[in-house]
Amino acid sequence: MKNILSGIFAAAFALSASAAAQAQDKPPLKIGGILDMSSLYADITGPGSETAAKMAVEDFGGEVLGRKIQVLAADHQNKADLSANIARDMLDNQGVEMIYDVAASATALAAGEIAKARNKIIMFNGPGSIRLTNEACGPYTIHYVFDTFGQANVTGLAAVKTGLDSWFFLTADYAFGQDLEKDTSAVVTKTGGKVLGSVRHPLNTSDFSSFLLQAQASKAKVIGLANAGGDTVNAIKQAAEFGITKGGQKVSPLLAFVSDIDSIGLETAQGLLLAEAFYWDLNDDTRAFSKRFMERTKRVPTSAQAGVYSSVTHYLKAVKAAGTTDAATVIKVMKETPINDFFAKNGKIREDGRMIHDMYLFEVKKPSESKGRWDDYKLLATVPGNEAFQSLEQSRCPLVKK
């Protein structure tokens, strides 16, 4: 009898050990970030986006469907061809199931085509071009945080309504800047304003003097900055140095992040109007996440970085609910499931891939109004997502049935 019982226990142990070994043999679920880790958008996304993705994975429990979750990240150096090559390598050779962030629009458009051809989910947090949910949309493409239409609609509309009705644009000469100028111009003219001209500058420009002089000579009430990151910071600083703002013209950054305002300083940035999808000090939930993020990075999260955490979490929940990583099944769950977290309330992913959520109009505080570093914004208005973003009726995405 003792020998029989020993045999039963040994068999049971062997089966248990075999099951554990099989679980350990499952390959990890890999998600890959294609980021600007060292250039003008590094503060907006970069290492902070990688940190946000890792925080999302840790908070989710580190595994799903019996598979460990692994976060990868690569630097695209703001080169579209390199972004495409990274996406191709991640999906073809490294076994990545989902790509996140892909900061900058040209790099996002390039990586998006690679993901689309392979029927893989790609979620954009840092890029803004409206093309990502228009002509370049795909069945597995999600534009999560902001886009040029939303930024233009929130900022441009508010400015014109206050009497700032003549504009001149300083535009970064690539997809994002061109779309931002186009979308803001449409809002300005539709609301009764005028566009007096524009000038395009190369990406990552250090000297804005000639461009600013053209803007100054236009006598426009508003100099709209259709750029982002280091370009926005440099343009605002140099506009102040040239006395342009003291001369009565208003500089309006059409895409700015709290990291940009921190770099510029409140003395120079005070009074700027800007649209954001997220601010660390909006409510208790945003403050709680931001406190944890700051413990790791020593900086508050930008809207793009907060969006990475939210979108990665939403993806992992969908994988768990679907019981598979099959892109078609997972994306169906993602689009059917509302998003309710610190980033979005009742957010929803539409058929064109646009994640609809509230946007916010802020004014940058005066130094005397700020309680300390990162206390930069005053909330002026909350704009519902269905008013901020392009409607489906206006969509040029082939997936939208009309």
Image (cartoon, rainbow, N blue to C red):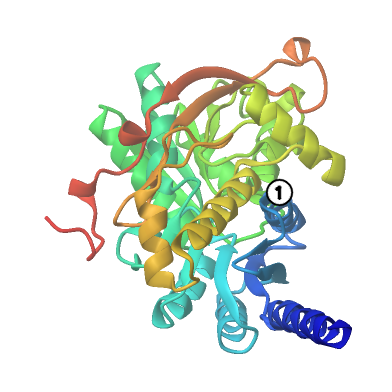
- Residue 130 seen by the camera: no
Q: Which residue is mark 1?
A: 59
User: Based on the displayed image, in which of its 4 quarters is residue 40 positioned?
Assistant: bottom right
User: Based on the displayed image, in which of its 4 quarters is residue 365 positioned?
Assistant: top right
Would you say 275 lies left or right of 229 here?
A: left
Above or below, 231 relative to 220: below
- Residue 193 seen by the camera: yes
Residue 361 x, y percent position in the rendering = 49, 25
Identify the residue at horizontal 82%, vertical 20% (top origin). 372
- The residue closer to the viewer here, 239 or 401, is 401
Residue 253 x, y percent position in the rendering = 55, 37
Identify the residue at horizontal 21%, vertical 58% (top origin). 400
Q: Quadrant of the C terminus?
A: bottom left
Would you say 189 lies left or right of 226 here?
A: left
SS class of the residue under badge 1? helix
Q: Residues within 10 Å of mark 1 (few under 14, many from 20)?
A: few
Q: Quadrant of the N terminus?
A: bottom right
Would you say 328 lies left or right of 204 here?
A: left
Q: Residue furthest front?
A: 1
Q: Residue furthest top?
A: 368
Above or below, 387 relative to 161: below
Image mark count: 1
Which amino acid, mark 1? Asp
Residue 213 x, y percent position in the rendering = 58, 42
Above or below, 347 relative to 158: below
Identify the residue at horizontal 69%, vertical 82% (top origin). 22
Residue 4 x, y percent position in the rendering = 81, 86
- The residue closer to the viewer here, 357 or 230, is 357
